Amino acid sequence: MLKKAATVFAVVFIAIGVLGFISPVTPKNDAGMPVLLGLFMVGALHNLIHLVSGIAAAVSAKSEAYASLYFKVFGVVYALVAVVGFIQKDTVLGLIHVNMADNLLHVVIAVATLYLGFAVKPEASKAA
């Protein structure tokens, strides 16, 4: 199950990373910042983070153990990103711009990935 979940995360994060670079999908808000689908703040670094997260998910999808580790690490990182985003309100460490929609999405991602990483046990490998 974890391998399949990691594959889904890979596809979604790579797609989000790519879409973040496409101007018609990321119109600028009143402050002149690109907003993915009119809701989520994006920028070059933010998009690259999504791409790297997706690639890491794809690599981790090769085994249940790697996928479990990915979700644990990814969950902790996204929880920290959410907390920092709520504290700083509009950036995460001054590196990426965020808004309330981003912060809430980061919480949802953190909860889901922490659950997958810590509550879902990796399936045993099947002998060929």
Image (tube, helix red, strand yellow):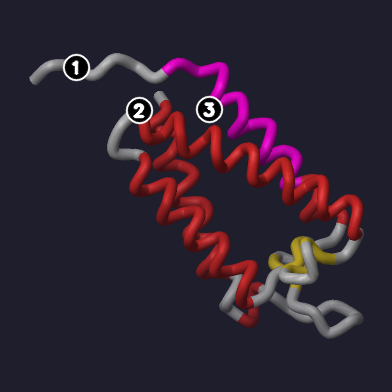
Q: Which residue is mark 3?
A: 117
| 124 to the left or right of 51 | left
User: Contact (CB < 8 A) between labels 2 and 3?
Assistant: no
Q: Nearer the viewer, residue 110 or 14?
A: 110
Whether 111 is among the magenta residues is yes
Q: Residue at x 49, y 44 (%)?
A: 9
Does 68 appear above or below 27? above
The secondary structure type at the circle numbered 1 is: loop
Q: Name the residue type under label 2.
A: Glu
Q: Position of residue 88 (x, y in %)?
A: 90, 59
Residue drawn 56% across and 60% down? 50
Specify the quadrant that holds the C terminus.
top left
Q: Examine the image and state in which quarter residue 119 appears.
A: top right
Q: How many marks?
A: 3
SS state under label 2: helix
Q: Quadrant of residue 98?
A: bottom right
Alpha carbons under labels 2 and 3: distance apart: 10 Å
Residue at point 37% right, 41% down?
Answer: 60
Q: Is residue 109 above or below residue 119?
A: below
| Residue for badge 1 | 126
Tell me which amino acid carries mark 1: Lys
Near-viewer residue (76 or 20): 76
| Left-right relation of 57 to 43 | left
Q: Residue furthest left?
A: 128
Per the rendered image, the range of residues in magenta is 105-121
Inspect the image, locate mark 3, and give the three-letter code of the amino acid beneath it. Gly
Q: Position of residue 48 (x, y in %)?
A: 54, 69
Q: Which residue is mark 2?
A: 64
Mark 1 vs mark 2, CA separation in Å? 11 Å
